[in-house]
Image (cartoon, rainbow, N blue to C red):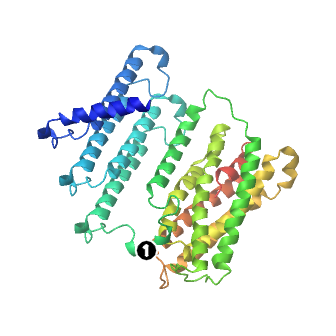
């Protein structure tokens, strides 16, 4: 095999010696890779369309009722390949709009692919008509448009210094707040991996019912026991570290700036912030287990919204403000999760342990209290001078108020109003975990 590879390389080098230098700088002539990728996409589209149009057995298969979705995805794919090739090989276009990096184009293509697939399911599968945001593709279209605008705006704001003083075009986060010590930590060099995981999570949740339609629920009792036990340990560790790295080690409940020094305490706080961030990815497995067990009603909007937004939100928290005022809510949240996963672990043991779960109602009360305390704590920063970024204070406050309202609504419906069916409240606690 090694001799074969060497022989091919030698023949390729001899072939390149005969290349026409006059076309070296012509469009798409510096490398055969873009042409190859486009041809691959073309072949896939042709095969897919042929099967779709000639074989009635696949009519109900995913994306096989019409060749249009495949065509749109292939068009986006070709545009991305050409754009990336130009951006990466032609220095003359470096200052052109969206040509300094292929990342913006990639992000836009990803969201367009998601929209095409989502719209195809919405318009062709009547089974999803009553599910959240699947009665019409319009909400998804509006969200995608907003996403594209954000990507383009952020790209311009971060790469073109000429627009720095224009309305709403300064960088979204001041560069002076960057926390250089976390730059080399796992997943911290760029928000892209976190963003893609969150997008993939939402796509999985939306496609999960379709994937599991003809499959039996997966038995995960032992897996859940181990998972909940591990999450109790992780939540206990985070709660302990938040306390003894800050809140029981000199932190103030009023203005508490971030310590950007290399002191042991500052590094300890930064480390637990990063661990808390990583834990948010692990918690995505909650929803994966729901889907595999076909407990789709537990993957509520609140549950998916909370789990999907936390990882990417906390990437910015660790990157720019790893410590200080903002860790108040993560300290409370770690304690709530310690109690919550203890409850889930006991619940997973079976009916014999149900008598020990009388405190389920109080778990919801604790969650509401958590968000009420975070709301009060965050509001004070808007009224005093403090060397802590107001942007993050606004974000934490908005987050707390939204979930305070949602949890209060759940509490009223689950415990104050007459139950319409058995088990309504039990699903709520898990579905609306914080």
* Quarter of the figure with residue 140: top left
Question: Which quarter of the rendering shows the C terminus?
Answer: bottom right
**In the shown orientation, is residue 237 left or right of residue 357?**
left
Expressed as whole percent of the image width and height from the top left, the position of residue 407 reads: 63, 59
Tell me the quadrant of the picture where the N terminus can be found: top left
Query: In this view of the protein, can residue 35 be seen by the observer?
Result: no
Q: How many marks?
A: 1
Residue 255 placement: quadrant: bottom right
Vertical comparison of 405 with 205: above or below: below
- In the rendering, at what x and y percent does residue 254 appear? 58, 83
**Callout 1: SS:** helix
Residue at x 33%, y 52% (from the top left corner) = 104
245 vs 112, nearest the viewer: 245
Question: Is residue 324 visible in this depiction of the protein?
Answer: yes
Mark 1 — residue? 177
On the rendered structure, is 226 left or right of 246? right
Q: Residue at x 66, y 43 (%)?
A: 289
Identify which residue, 336 or 179, lies in the foreground.
Answer: 179
Q: Is residue 29 left or right of residue 386?
A: left
């Amino acid at each position: 095999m090694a001799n074969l590879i060497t022989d091919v390389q030698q023949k390729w080098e001899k072939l390149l010696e005969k290349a026409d230098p006059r076309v070296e700088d012509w469009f798409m002539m510096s490398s055969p890779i873009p042409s190859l990728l486009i041809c691959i996409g073309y072949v896939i589209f042709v095969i897919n369309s042929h099967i779709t149009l000639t074989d009635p057995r696949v009519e109900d298969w995913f994306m096989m009722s019409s060749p249009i979705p495949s065509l749109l995805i292939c068009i986006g794919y070709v545009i991305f390949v050409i754009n990336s090739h130009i951006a990466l090989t032609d220095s003359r276009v470096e200052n052109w709009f969206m040509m300094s990096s292929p990342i913006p184009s990639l992000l836009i293509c990803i969201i367009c692919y998601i929209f095409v697939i989502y719209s195809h399911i919405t318009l062709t599968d009547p089974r999803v008509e009553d599910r959240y945001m699947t009665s019409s593709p319009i909400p998804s279209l509006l969200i995608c448009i907003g996403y594209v605008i954000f990507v383009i705006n952020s790209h311009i704001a971060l790469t073109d210094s000429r627009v720095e003083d224009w309305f709403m075009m300064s960088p979204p986060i001041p560069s002076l707040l960057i926390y250089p010590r976390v730059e080399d930590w796992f997943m911290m060099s760029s928000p892209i991996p976190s963003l893609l995981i969150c997008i993939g999570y939402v796509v999985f949740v939306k496609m999960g019912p379709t994937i599991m339609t003809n499959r039996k629920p997966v038995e995960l009792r032992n897996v859940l026991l181990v998972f909940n036990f591990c999450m109790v340990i992780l939540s206990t560790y985070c709660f302990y570290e938040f306390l003894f790295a800050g809140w029981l080690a000199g932190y103030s409940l009023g203005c508490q700036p971030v310590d950007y020094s290399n002191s042991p305490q500052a590094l300890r706080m930064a480390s637990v912030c990063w661990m808390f961030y990583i834990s948010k990815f692990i918690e995505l497995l909650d929803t994966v287990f729901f889907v595999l067990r076909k407990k789709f009603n537990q993957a509520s909007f609140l549950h998916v919204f909370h789990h999907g937004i936390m990882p990417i939100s906390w990437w910015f928290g660790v990157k720019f403000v790893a410590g200080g005022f903002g860790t108040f809510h993560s300290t409370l949240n770690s304690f709530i999760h310690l109690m919550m996963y203890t409850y889930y672990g006991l619940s997973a043991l079976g009916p014999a342990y149900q008598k020990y779960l009388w405190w389920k109602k109080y778990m919801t009360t604790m969650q509401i209290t958590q968000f009420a305390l975070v709301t009060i704590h965050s509001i004070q920063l808007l009224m005093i001078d403090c060397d802590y970024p107001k942007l993050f204070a606004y974000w934490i406050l908005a987050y707390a108020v939204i979930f305070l309202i949602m949890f209060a609504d759940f509490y009223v419906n689950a415990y104050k109003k007459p139950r319409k069916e058995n088990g309504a409240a039990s699903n709520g606690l898990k579905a609306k975990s914080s």
